[in-house]
């Protein structure tokens, strides 16, 4: 029985990401959730009816990896031959950015995501003082506390700090604001800290994510030690003289630390076929960042076709504006299919919605009763041949409707 306070949305077509396209129906929204999907009612009893009878509806997009607080660096960090030179430039430039400029970047970046259909943001963030700004954003958010600490003697300090942040900001947590933990990467976090953070994430039931196999030097560092990566850590004063390279691939290394289970692994450009079995075994999720991959002009990117064929769940992320020109998610979809043409549009949409949600342990990303009412809509001037082509249309830079937790944005 629908009630007067429910909200009814009439749609022309709906891709629920749980089954086939539905046409000419209604969605009933109650308490921020999808209550029912019904056939069109001629005389609805709800007081609020949104007429989207000329729109295609989809679940809102899940941006599964971003660093929104780096949005102020848009166009400022030069492309460099070596990854460590890019990090050096990023650190130098970001140190001089005033706090207010950072806040403005966060707002502008969030707006760009919202207008291009993102309703859930999974973001890496290292500055707790930015949380209040994030709390104001209408997006559904999973904020991964990003941690560094290659020196083994940092473990206790970093863990205490992370726990203190989680406790002191617990009041921010609500239906659309959650925390996660993100040790930055295998080359910047000690094995001890990795294990300690994983155990903290398990204790507190938080999603766990890190950058994995992003660039070739990372692989070399783990297999042989030394090289550009070690020089960089020494230069930063954070190298651990007692560290011995595990002499394995990155995923084998993470498996040896027992941190692969349900890990949200970002990038994976340089993994081996044998790594995929480990991912499958441990339900490791993959995040592909199309715009960032293009920006860095990566010669190798993750074996996404194989990943999907093996039933490993994947999502899509924009990464930050320090390595991408835009946070427009519709642009990401277009770059994605250009970089990896053998993936179908329905598969890209699946990654952009349900896949991203699944690896982040979110109930969003699908349209079915009980799921969050996070929706996006595209105006249709005529019935398309294939509905899944609509978000990929070159002329579409923005969505025409957006709703998060039952609130129209
Ligand atoms: Zn990143």
Image (cartoon, rainbow, N blue to C red):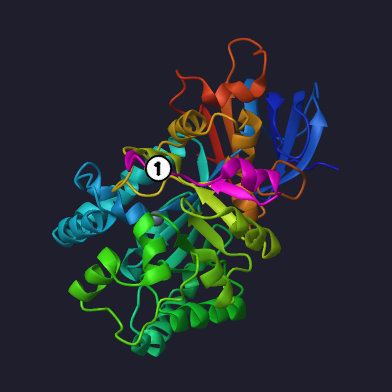
Between residues 45 and 106, which one lies in front from this camera angle?
A: 106
> Is residue 325 in view?
yes
Question: Extreme left residue here?
Answer: 96
Q: Residue at x 46, y 19 (%)?
A: 394
List x then y, in percent, for residue 83.
Answer: 28, 54
| Left or right relative to 280: residue 136 | left
Between residues 31 and 367, which one lies in front from this camera angle?
A: 367
Number of other residues with Cα within 10 Å of mark 1, as a class: few under 14, some 14 to 19, many 20 or more? many
Between residues 326 and 238, which one lies in front from this camera angle?
A: 238
Query: With respect to residue 105, does 95 lie above or below?
Result: below
| Left or right relative to 118: residue 232 | left
List x then y, in percent, for residue 84.
Answer: 25, 59
List x then y, in percent, for residue 38.
Answer: 81, 32
Query: With respect to residue 52, does 356 lie above or below?
Result: below
Give yes or no for residue 313 being in the magenta stretch.
yes
Which residue in the structure is indicated by mark 1? 293
Between residues 232 and 219, which one lies in front from this camera angle?
A: 219
Q: Residue at x 57, y 76 (%)?
A: 256
List x then y, in percent, for residue 380.
Answer: 59, 16
Question: Extreme top residue here?
Answer: 382
Residue 124 appears in which quarter of the rendering?
bottom left
Query: With respect to residue 242, does 204 lie above or below?
Result: above
Residue 89 appears in which quarter of the rendering?
bottom left
How many marks overall? 1
Q: Which quadrant contains ligand 1?
A: bottom left
Query: Range of the magenta residues?
Result: 295-315
Question: Extreme right residue here?
Answer: 1
Identify the secondary structure beneath mark 1. helix
Give yes or no for residue 131 being in the magenta stretch.
no
| Left or right relative to 131: residue 233 | left
Query: With respect to residue 408, does 394 lie above or below?
Result: above
Q: Quadrant of the N terminus?
A: top right
């Amino acid at each position: 029985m629908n009630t007067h306070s429910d909200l009814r949305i009439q749609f022309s077509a709906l891709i629920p990401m749980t089954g086939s396209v539905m046409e000419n129906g209604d969605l009933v929204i109650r308490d921020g959730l999808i209550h029912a999907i019904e056939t069109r009612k001629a005389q609805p009893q709800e007081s609020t009816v949104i007429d989207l009878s000329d729109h295609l509806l989809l679940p809102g997009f899940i941006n599964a990896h971003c660093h929104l607080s780096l949005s102020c660096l848009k166009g400022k960090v030069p492309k460099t031959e070596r990854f460590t030179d890019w990090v050096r430039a990023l650190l130098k430039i970001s140190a001089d950015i005033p706090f207010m400029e950072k806040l403005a970047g966060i707002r502008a970046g969030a707006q760009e995501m919202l207008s291009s259909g993102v309703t859930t943001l999974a973001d890496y963030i290292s500055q707790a003082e930015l949380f209040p700004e994030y709390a104001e954003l209408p997006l559904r958010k999973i904020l991964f506390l990003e941690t560094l600490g290659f020196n083994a003697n940092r473990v206790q300090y970093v863990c205490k700090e992370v726990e203190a942040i989680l406790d002191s900001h617990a009041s921010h947590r609500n239906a659309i604001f959650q925390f996660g933990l993100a040790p930055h990467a295998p080359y910047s976090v000690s094995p001890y800290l990795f294990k300690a953070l994983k155990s903290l994430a398990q204790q507190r039931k938080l999603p766990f994510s890190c950058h994995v196999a992003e660039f070739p030097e990372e692989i070399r560092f783990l297999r042989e030690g030394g090289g550009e990566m070690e020089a960089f850590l020494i230069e930063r004063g954070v190298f651990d003289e007692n560290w011995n390279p595990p002499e394995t691939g990155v995923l084998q290394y993470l498996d040896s630390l027992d941190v692969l289970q349900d890990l949200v692994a970002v990038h994976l450009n340089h993994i081996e076929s044998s790594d995929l079995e480990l991912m499958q075994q441990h339900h490791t999720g993959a995040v592909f960042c199309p715009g960032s991959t293009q920006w860095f002009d990566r010669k190798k990117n993750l074996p996404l076709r194989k990943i999907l064929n093996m039933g490993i769940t994947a999502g899509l992320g924009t990464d930050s504006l320090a390595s991408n020109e835009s946070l427009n998610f519709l642009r990401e979809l277009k770059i994605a299919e250009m970089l990896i043409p053998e993936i179908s549009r329905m598969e890209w949409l699946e990654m952009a919605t349900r896949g991203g949600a699944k690896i982040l342990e979110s109930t969003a990303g699908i349209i079915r009763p009980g799921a969050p009412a996070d929706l996006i809509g595209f105006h249709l001037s005529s019935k398309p041949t294939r509905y899944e082509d609509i978000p990929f249309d070159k002329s579409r830079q923005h969505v025409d409707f957006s709703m998060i937790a039952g609130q129209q944005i």
